[in-house]
Image (cartoon, rainbow, N blue to C red):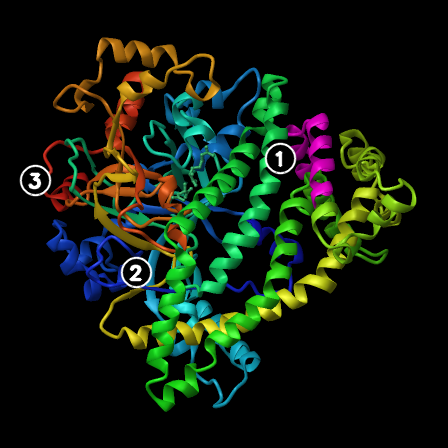
Amino acid sequence: MDSIKVIDMLRKGIILVVIVAFVVNAANAVEGMWLPIMLKKYNIEQMQAEGFKLSAEDIYDINKASLKDAIVGLVRLSKPFRHFCTGEIVSPEGLVLTNHHCGFGAIQKHSTVENNLLKDGFWAMNKNEELTNEGIGMCLLKRMEDVTAKVLVNIPDGADAYIRDSVIQSNIAIIEEDAIKETHYLAKVKPFFAGNEYYLSVYEIFRDIRLVGAPPSAIGKFGGDTDNWMWPRHTGDFSMFRIYANKDNEPADYNDENIPYKPLMHLPIAIDEIKKDDFTMVMGYPGTTEEYLPSFAINLRANVTNPARIKIRTEVINIMKTGMLTSPEVRIQYSSKVAHKANGWKKRIGENKGLVRLNAIEKKQEQEKLFTDWVNQNEERIKEYGDIFNNYEDLYGQLNEYQFVYAYFNESILGTELIDLAGSYSDLFEYKKESNNEDVEMKIDDLTKKTKNFFKDYHRPTDKKLFVALLSFYYNDVDAKYHPKSFSAIDKKYKGDYEACFINLFEKSMFNNPEKLNNFLNNYSVSKNKKLSSDPVMKLFIESMYVYHNSVSPYLVSIKQDISNLHKTYVKGIRELNSDKIYFPDANSTFRIAYGKVDNYIPSDAVEYKCFTTLQGIMEKDNPDIFDYDVPQRLRDLYKSKNFGEYANSDGTMPVCFTASNHTTGGNSGSPVLNADGHLIGINFDRNWEGTMSDLMYDPEMCRNITLDARYILFIIDKYAGAKHLVNEMTLVKESKQNPQAIKKEKK
Ligand code: ARG
Ligand code: ASP
């Protein structure tokens, strides 16, 4: 997300280089995120040997309804197309389950101090009560195709990287256009295996998505940031939405006349007891993994960028949390912001610990040694791969400094909300006297909306502290040659008192003053651009972008491009070296399937974690004095009366979460976790802290995904919220022996 932010700001012309690819031994079942169109070839036999009862076509088929037709990717309509979470359709009327933290932004937007949906929860008792959510979309995968040959056609022999890339880009444009002719679909071609292969995905994107239900945050976010990334876990991390379509069952903008979407397929929910070692499968949109980086890259991440980001965020989170204690309003305003910051912060801490524990750098070095030995076996290989590690070393040696500044630039400059807001206003500089009035008006409307949204979640005293702290980090830690020009006043005017300087910049800016900004927008004409450019925060934005464009990004982009070219070769070599192994491509926000089993783990010496948690654990954590563990009275009462309906285990306990060995990553949140029959048994929402390095190096002993048990979801909807009508919409299955195909037919 952070890198996207910078790319957003830079907008045109810069290529985001994603380093992809990894290798796995087929015997190592749990590692890997597999392509639905390759299951038949690579995975299905093994999946079936491990208990899966369906066929590859039951998962993915373009001629008949298959499980993929029940899985949605969540996207932000105003941002570049990228899934931020996954969800699954669980009723014939387009009802979708996803995580509470995936719907958090939407729930928070509907919340005020008087009507606090975050705190109290929300349940639409009928369809008229469902709430619209501008800007959120859900997409269905229509099909996927290997288009490698078509993408790599017409590349002249001996073409340099630049020519090669432009031919590839134009081939991709043609393929994408062809793929959606005469449809309302969207097509995306992405590189896999570091650009050794290319696949096309075609999506249908629904734009009218309504909020149907969310538990109170004391359930949906139970354990908060304290328990986040941790096991044992008791978070009821779910929320419900409904997809609306036009009368032809096609995507449409929000409209009163829209009707609930009728899916080709919805997932039946199994309410059977779950046991250790049961087969599990996760479907959805994992965002990014980088399993096949060389040791130099791991070093950069573990020793340069992670520590930088952790350091800055520690302070940011402290300041936000202190602000949130001042009033219930500030708590709402900063809850989503702090959750977002804290999530990445804790992930990186866990990741670094995991990398150290695994000796990841040494392990990579050993692999590199094996690779070198293999290369040295013959002349051809020496020609093709002989320089790889020298080149990597040289390039990463250069990259370290720029990547460090980039991390600071993202976290502290663009992490400063006022500078980010000023960035949106900087679009106005594109207008000249002769500009089209309509365009200008549209921009002003857009900025007016943005400004209103911004101040809904703005607390000036908190932001002032953040502003000073974030700029101080940049000032103190980043070499002066990367400082924005305004920093020169620190020595000249403020005798080194940088905080005084930043406070002054803050006070003199109009960007923290909604009245001034509205006044500016209401009376806008291009002649006001001069005034705009002299605002101290706008100046900081412009100067920082100038530094970034001139002294950072050209080097960063070119080094990363060189690394990416090298990486393509390296990954090719790895696959050649291990030609008997089956490889999975790194996650890249395309549809994937992971499989494993319900499993426990040993986090440290003498400690063993079981794989199930129950409601009893919630009661053990219950503490009204700790915000994250303040259990709602109604849940305590239900626990006491053991009013669990048909959702309890046979021993009478109420299941909450479980761990399994599916290889997942960010973006897999909200993903369905299915059993051997393809029935929903839970929603994926997290990983264990000891396993968060799985984005770079997977450890089958330690890496677990954390799933919210479907039965707890049903219990909360039915018994806690009294929204049984929603459960009635779903298809519950008691005996896993039932055939899902039969259910599908019965439901049609
Ligand atoms: N760690 C999970 C993920 O990466 C859940 C994050 C939301 N929860 C939170 N307390 N911030 O998305
Ligand atoms: N919590 C993550 C998500 O939001 C999942 C993970 O990183 O394991 O996608």
- Between the residue at mark 1 and the residue at mark 2, the CA separation in whole angstroms equals 40 Å
Q: Amino acid at mark 1?
A: Glu
Q: Ligand 1, what quadrant? A: top left
Q: Amino acid at mark 2?
A: Leu
Per the rendering, the mark at residue 199 is none
Per the rendering, the mark at residue 737 is 3
Per the rendering, the mark at residue 35 is 2
Quick one: label 1 or label 3, which is nearer the N terminus? 1
The residue carrying mark 1 is: 315
Is 218 situated left or right of 700 in this image?
right
Q: Position of residue 159 (x, y in %)?
A: 52, 86
Q: Position of residue 249 (x, y in %)?
A: 36, 46
Q: Position of residue 538 (x, y in %)?
A: 79, 46
Quick one: label 1 or label 2, which is nearer the N terminus? 2
Q: Which residues are magenta?
A: 449-473
Viewer-closest of 85 and 416: 416
Residue 462 on the magenta span: yes
Viewer-closest of 646 and 556: 556
Q: Amino acid at mark 3?
A: Lys
Please identify, in this view, whether the residue under mark 1 or under mark 3 is nearer the observer.
Answer: 1
Q: Residue at x 53, y 70 (%)?
A: 393
Q: Residue at x 60, y 19 (%)?
A: 325
Query: For the residue labelled by badge 3, is the local secondary structure a helix, a strand or a loop?
Result: loop
- Between the residue at mark 1 and the residue at mark 3, the CA separation in whole angstroms equals 53 Å
Q: Assess mark 1: CB under 8 A from ligand 1?
A: no
